[in-house]
Structures are given as structure tokens and as C-alpha cells.
Image (tube, rainbow, N blue to C red):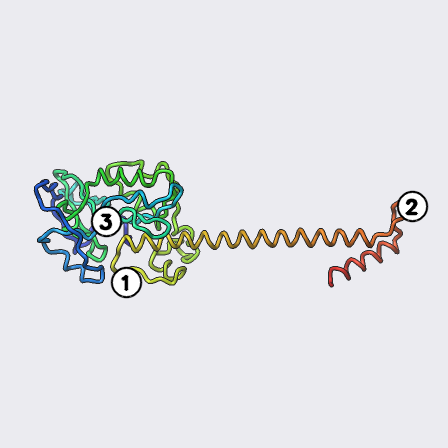
Amino acid sequence: MSSSKQSGPTKASSVTKAAAKPSSSQSKPHFNPLSESTNIKDHMRKRDPPYCRATQVQPAFHLLRDDEAVAFDVEFQRICKNPTEKRKVWQSRLGWFSVVGEAGQEIFNCFVFYDNEPGTEKAMDPIRFGVLREDLKAHNGARNGREVEATLRRIFQGRKVIMHDRRGDMKAFYTISDAFDQSEIVDTQQLYRHLQPESGQPGLRDTALKVLGRVIQAGGLHNPSEDARATMDLWLEHRRQADTQAEDAKDAGLLIAETSAEEGDSAKELIPSSGDGICSGKSERRISRELCRHRSV
């Protein structure tokens, strides 16, 4: 997940005209086994033969229970629709994303290309965020944005969708506006906002380290699969803590109820019976002393 979701491209960003959709005659990509620890610059060259760095380009619906939550994380590409103006306005959209289930299983992970729009410019974030120009080509395995966004809406429908700093990820949908309309959104940044009292917006990397003891984004490199799994585990940990607190409160309530019942029974045993049902002042003082002694035992 990018640390600056709404910022425009830096000077280091490369800007070109949006790529045209490749023809179907181009070769089919294969998966490249190079790990993310490999120098990411190795992937920037023209790929011959073509290959794809994404890990689940076909959605694995069969790996999800009907009631299962999913975590969602996005790395971005940027588009500018006023490239000739002095003050350019850049918009984020899906570049590389991951959807994972509660066990961390990969449900959907792919790079995204959008149909060419004349008069626009496209820019990549700095390479540490993981989206490279070569990744966004169909012959390297990228999928059409309109189809991808519709599939994501289908995955999210009727589910909890867990994100960290949801604002940027939700705004990255470029062709549809209702991707989350039938979902319950959970933002782990808000669940753990106490970790950064000044802003209430702790970053995912710091939150994962403090709560899970897990190092992510090592060397500054982002990977949506890693970030989505950390986001899911943060939610599961928060839910576990809430369940534990609820169970402790329930146990405490039962203990108080049992203690009150026992004290009530003891009080009944100490109260002497009288003809009119009224104790004398001396009897009341003796009962009070006995009750105090009973509670201290």
C-alpha cells in the first residue's frame, strides 16, 4: 500500500501516453518464479519471452466460504486527463492488487491495464511500490480494468472487506462506483488509531510490527499480497482480543452474580424471626456485624 495515496508522480516517475491494448496474437505470458527479494529493476526490461509477476490472475472463488471476510490492498498507477495544462491533476487507479481470505489464501492477485484514452498521460509511482510499466501490458499477463473491477465487486458482495487506510484503495476504482455498496468495510487503521495518538493514522508497516511483531515492506518494497495478509491478521488479532475481553467480562459478571446470591442466602440465615417481622435496633446492629464478618472471610 502506498504511503502517499493521493500524491502525484514524482520527478522520478516516468510519464508516457497510455498504452494501447495489445493484439490477441501476442504470446501468452508465463509466471516468472523470481522472488520479490530479487532486484525489482530486473523486471523493468522488455520481457522476452513475456512473463507475469502476479500470482492469482484468475479469481479463486472456490477458496472462500460464503461468510468469509477478505482483505484488500492496492498499489497504484496514475492517470492525468489534463496533461497540457500547467497544473496537472493526477488520479489513482488499480495497478496491482491482492485479495486474501482469512487464512491468508490468495483469492485474486493481478496487474491491471485500462483501455487507451486519447489525450491522457499515465505515470508510475516510484518503483519501490512495485508497479512497473512492463507489468501493465496484456502480453505480460495484465488484465482489463473494467473486467477486474466488476470481478472485485462480485468478490466483495455481502462480505466484510478489510483494508488499512481504506480511502485510497476505495477511490482506485476507475470504471465503477459501487464496488463496495453491498459490503461491510473495516479499516484496521481506525481499529489501531491509538498507536499514533497525534494523527490517529498509523501506517501499516508500523502497526504490523507493533501488534503482530511482523516485519513487512522490508527495504521499502511494497507487495500487495504481503500487505493484505498483514491487514487481515491485524483484524483477526483485534477480533481475538475483543472476544477475550467479552469472555472475561462474562465470567466476571457470573462471579458477581454468584457472590451476590451467596451473600443474600447468608443474610437470610442471620435474620431472626419475630412475631411482627421487625428486628430490634440491637438485632440490626448484630446482623450488620455478622454480614461484614461474612464478607471478609
Q: Position of residue 31 (x, y in %)?
A: 18, 52
State the separation of the CA atoms marked 3 and 1: 18 Å
What x and y, as percent, mark residue 124? 18, 51
Q: Which mark is residue 96?
A: 3
Residue 149 appears anywhere in the view: yes
The reply to whether callout 2 and callout 3 are in contact (CB within 8 Å) is no
Query: Which circle marks residue 275 in the picture?
Result: 2
Q: Can residue 133 be spotted in the picture?
A: no
Q: Secondary structure at mark 3?
A: strand
Label for residue 218?
1
- Residue at x 14% of width, y 59% of height: 42
Check disc 2 and give the amino acid type.
Answer: Gly
Mark 2 nearby-residue class (10 Å; few <14, some 14–19, many ≥20): few
Cα gap from disc 2 to disc 1, whole angstroms = 83 Å
User: Which of the two discs, 2 and 1, labels the residue nearer the N terminus?
Assistant: 1
Q: Secondary structure at mark 2?
A: loop
Task: Identify residue type, mark 1.
Answer: Ala
Can you tell which quarter of the image residue 276 is in?
top right
